[in-house]
Amino acid sequence: MAAANNDPPDLSDVESFTAIDGPGSTGTHHQQTTIANNDNDNNITSSPTVGCQGGGSNIINGLIGLSSSIQESIVRIVRDKASDNGKESQGEIDLADLKKLEVIHTDSSSEHTTITTRHHNHDDDKKQPEEFTTIIPDHGPRPRPQNIMQLPPELLLAIISHCPFADIIRLRQTCKFFRHMASPNNLRIMLGKEELRKLLHNHCKKCLIYDQFGRKLLLSPVGVGDRLLTNECHACVLREKKDERIQVGRKVCLADNSTAWVCRWCGWPITGSRTGVGTGAGRGANGVPAYGHEQWHRACYGEYTSALVLFAFAGFFQFCFGVVGAALSWKYFRDWVAVFAPSVTGFLLLWLCLGFITFRGNRRETYHWTFLLELVILGLWIMPVCFIGKHFADHPDQKVSKSVQASLALFGLNILFRFINLIGNTILLFKPDVTRRCRPEVSKIKKAWYKVICFFIFWTYPASLEQKNPPDQRG
């Protein structure tokens, strides 16, 4: 307490102090004092009061239990009185002046606090004591910081130093204040130059994902700076439609200065090792490459092998249906040239189409030739069906035998297979990128569309995935 240790309270926060003499009254000296305090910008008014009752003690006992703002107000009144007596108002207040002041009444309400004090002049006992009433507006306690920016800079830097680096970058993007507070120089001091460089190098500049080893990140083509985030993760690069760094059949440069192939099945970089566990980037076995096939993830190559097996079974059944259809035409429609000739010709062209699929390998794209062959075979199988249907339509009294029904069923299945192959070869002519189905944030409609495209491609020729930049082409 300021009065308990006989030291006056600190009044350094007082901006101005003005004493104004007011009108007088009988037997009492009237004085009004206005004080401006920069703590809460409140005006404290003191005015004389006549006939106040109530006993009290001296100022030392009276100040005990009062708030610091009230104590300072009372001391200011003493300072004002000392100024009226010719003393220096800006100097130290004498303890004797404090003892002349007596607090005789206090009254606190929700809006203000009223203090009644009595000043005794011991030098002149005949002079009547003067009483003062001080009204102090009550605006509650001093307001606390309303947001984090009002905290001391040292505390803010201590908080920032405990945040993850990604959160610090996000904090820098909120406003200019935190951008300046978390400046590169401050971060370099808090984290260290080498640690800051490592964090900048191993974070994605878009999603701010962190990779300790740098194999989930692609090295920026413009290089890595000490102040900038330049590397990007695989997912962010794949989201960009115009970014062509990740292409099937080519290698990409990773943030750890190594290279990796792009998987031909899913389109994600193959970042794992053959014997160890992968880094989690990409699909299938945590990014581990397949044995003997470095351009495929291990799990992706398993799916591709399954597609090849299904393609082989589908091709075998197509060939069997073609052979059976031609045999039925030979047995039951040998005398019908419009049925026998097209079916046998389609059977022969089927062998030619099988030769294209078997011997073209992964270097030559022969989709335009197989497209023409499938179109011709489709037309050849349609001709017998149309002729037979027209014949029985012209002869409604003629009964359709089971052999004719079986022949029409086989002819219809060959038409269906040839039509699917025709659509598949048409799609292959446009060289679609089927790896887009595995990219992040693909809508459900696009996923369904890619599944339809993949069905026709895998039905027609799944080995087309190896046609673009063959496996033995490096670069």
Image: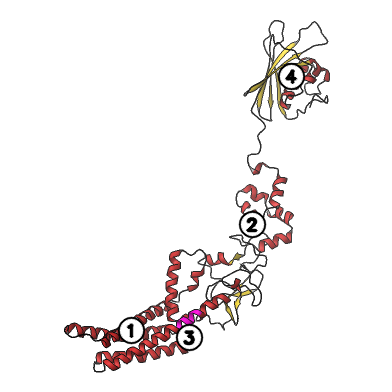
The residue where tag 3 is placed is 364
Q: Where the N terminus falls, by quadrant?
A: top right
Q: Is residue 115 magenta?
A: no
Residue located 49% across and 87% down the image: 361
The residue beneath circle 4 is: 77
Disc 2 residue type (three-letter): Ala
CA separation in Å, label 3 and label 2: 48 Å
First of labels 3, 2 by sequence position = 2
Q: Is residue 175 visible?
A: yes
Judge from the rendering whether residue 179 lies leftward or rightward of residue 430; answer left or right: right
Please name the residue that numbered disc 2 is placed on: 166
Mark 4 or mark 2: which comes first in sequence?
A: 4
Sooner in the amino-acid sequence: mark 1 or mark 2: 2
4 and 2 marks in contact (CB < 8 Å): no
**Residue 396 location, quadrant:** bottom left
165 relative to 237, above or below: above
Q: Residue at x 43, y 88 (%)?
A: 356
Circle 4 residues within 10 Å: few <14, some 14–19, many ≥20: many
Residue 271 relative to residue 389: left or right: right
The amino acid marked with disc number 1 is Leu
Q: Residues within 10 Å of mark 3 (few under 14, many from 20)?
A: few
State the mark number for residue 378.
1
Query: Badge 2: few (under 14), some or many (20 or more) residues near its Cα, within 10 Å?
Result: some
* Circle 3: residue type: Arg
Q: Secondary structure at mark 1?
A: helix
